[in-house]
Image (cartoon, grey):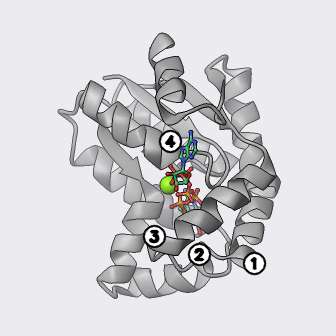
Amino acid sequence: MKNYILFGPPGSGKGTQSDLMIEKFKLIHLATGNMLRAEIQQKSTLGMEAQAIINRGELVPDMIVNAMIEEKIKSNQQAAGFLFDGYPRTIIQAESLDNLLMKFHSTIQLVFSLVVPEEELVKRLLNRGLTSGRTDDNENIIKARINEYKEKTAAVGQYYQRKNKLIELDGTQTIEEVFSNILKNT
Ligand code: AP5
Ligand code: MG
């Protein structure tokens, strides 16, 4: 099983590169943001709780996302591998993922960190907001999401750096160039 993480701030291109990677490597895409938006659409209790948090640009509690990931991994044990997108976002989530994968005698192969300056992130997300229908793609919430990234998520990059699993990539290149740099490292 080969597992990868696409890591980076909001708007850095995690979802965009995920689509290319899952196609190429037949990985199962585990994107906690997408899972939470599906819950919101179904108007589940979890979805309603998550919606308020997402609309403040804050992180949903670790226990909720850890449980969602655990359920997906347990139910897809025959997978060629998993591609994590937008998870883990805290050290607690990273440790939970490590423990979970260990139970299945697996591990994280590499973490691709997409590096993009803040003003470009804001520009991309405002632009995406014109068509995405995402309630969190507006200026104030984008700022809050980026702050949350700096305060809680950036440390996850250092966590994998210490394990020698972090590959930093210039996320300002074209989509094709970024993907080709990912491929060079797989
Ligand atoms: P989530 O859905 O994960 O959103 P995000 O991290 O804010 O990231 P985005 O989806 O906005 O950006 P992306 O990096 O995927 O970029 P994309 O490829 O779309 O999370 C949403 C919320 O859910 C969180 O705020 C939180 O509340 C909650 N949540 C989710 N996971 C959680 C977790 N694990 N723990 C706790 N809470 C959690 O690209 C962006 C735009 O740029 C697109 O328009 C794209 O076309 C464009 N673009 C992409 N690449 C390029 C390029 N190379 N050049 C030019 N444009 C590009
Ligand atoms: Mg995304």
Q: Nearer the viewer, residue 49 or 118?
A: 118
Q: Amino acid at mark 3?
A: Ser
> Mark 2 vs ligand 1: CB under 8 Å?
yes
Whole-number angstrom distance, CA of label 1 to CA of label 4: 31 Å
Q: Nearer the viewer, residue 48 or 116?
A: 116
Residue at the image position 67 percent from the left and 73 percent from the top: 57
Q: Quadrant of residue 124?
A: bottom right
Q: Amino acid at mark 4?
A: Leu
Classify residue 146 as left or right of residue 80.
right
**Precedes in sequence: disc 1 or disc 4:** 4
Residue 129 percent coordinates (x, y): 55, 71
Q: Residues within 10 Å of mark 2 (few under 14, many from 20)?
A: many
Residue at the image position 45 percent from the left and 45 percent from the top: 16
Q: Amino acid at mark 1?
A: Asn
Whole-number angstrom distance, CA of label 2 to CA of label 4: 26 Å
Disc 3 is placed on an element classified as helix
Residue 147 percent coordinates (x, y): 80, 62
Residue on which disc 1 sits: 140
Residue on which disc 4 sits: 97
**Residue 98 seen in render:** no
Looking at the rendered image, the disc whose residue lies closer to the viewer, 1 or 4, is 1
- The answer to whether the residue labelled 4 contacts the one labelled 3, judged by CB atoms less than 8 Å apart, is no
Residue 178 percent coordinates (x, y): 54, 28
Looking at the rendered image, the disc whose residue lies closer to the viewer, 4 or 3, is 3
Whole-number angstrom distance, CA of label 4 to CA of label 3: 29 Å
Residue on which disc 2 sits: 136
**Precedes in sequence: disc 2 or disc 4:** 4
Whole-number angstrom distance, CA of label 2 to CA of label 1: 9 Å
